[in-house]
Amino acid sequence: MQTAGFLKEMFGLQGKTAVVIGGTGELCGVMAEGLAHAGCEVVLVGRIREKGEKKLERIAEFGGEGYFMPVDVTSTESMKKLLDQVVEKSGQVDILINGAGINAPTPFLDIPEDEFHRIIDTNLTAVFRSCQVFGKYFIENEVAASIINLGSMSGIVPLSRVFTYSATKAAVHNLSKNLAREWAEYSVRVNTLVPGFFPAEQNRKVLDESRVLDILRQTPMSRFGSPDDLIGATLLLASNRAGAFITGTEIVVDGGFNAMKI
């Protein structure tokens, strides 16, 4: 077997459809591009159509296929409508990525309840909603599916200035493991992709000069992650060939941050 053919068979996603919630953002947008490069039809889900259309233009440049769908991640009915529209348009959903998220740098003692609940609802409850809606579809239709939930380094080790965000991501990690255990018998794999420090939009508000230096000192590779660094892990987890026996795990892409203790 030729190497190119072997890799295409292992990581190729021809004929698959991926719903990428948060796909209009920087990290999930690049993950969606990687899926499209592998032959997957991608559905970019977000709030701002213009951002989605711009990313779809990049995907179309190399012959990739996809389209934009709006959703209110805080509404179960909106999530159900999204699923129905994608199934009607594409025929089936095979891959779900949950990557929508918001952050706030508010010191713990100053966090107002409305901010706390807003972050919880977007980062955690929305993942619960989408996994429940799409998971039911996967199980009832016997789809050997892959769910990739975006975690965070702050869900593994304590990080200051992102208290509510950290709590939501730790819960997403735990939710993913529990769903992996529950749904393995249905061939529905659930994993957590854990980015280290990436210059994503939601991180910039907490990345002052001193914090940047602290992060780089703690990162053996001495750099921030590039969105492209997430593509390989995404394809591994998305593929039912390459990732066939991978479920309930956390794949950390952090340049060694979590391995650096002293």
Image: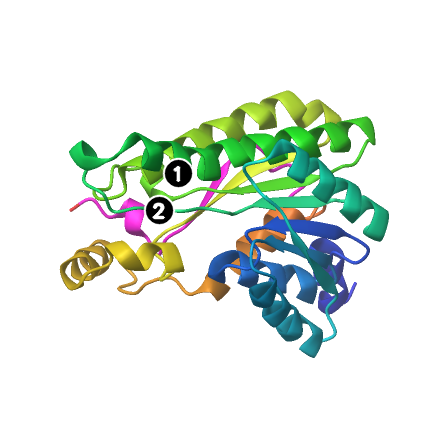
- Who is closer to the viewer here, 61 or 85? 85
Q: Residue at x 15, y 47 (%)?
A: 262
- Location of the N terminus by quadrant is bottom right
Position of residue 51 relative to residue 194, above or below, is: below
SS category of the residue bearing label 1? helix
Instruction: Please tell me whether the stretch drawn in magenta is mainly helix, strand or loop.
Output: loop
Whole-angstrom CA distance, mark 1 to mark 2, is 7 Å
Q: Could you tell me if the residues under marks 1 and 2 are in contact, i.e. CB atoms within 8 Å? A: yes
Q: Position of residue 62 (x, y in %)?
A: 69, 76
Residue 175 as seen in the image, left or right of residue 38: left
Dividing the picture into quadrants, the one containing residue 205 is bottom left
For residue 103, which numbered disc appears in the image? 2
Residue 61 as seen in the image, left or right of residue 220: right
Magenta range? 243-261
Tell me which amino acid carries mark 2: Asn
Q: Residue at x 16, y 64 (%)?
A: 209
Is 254 inside the magenta-drawn segment? Answer: yes
Answer whether residue 92 is visible to the viewer in this image.
no
The residue under label 1 is 119
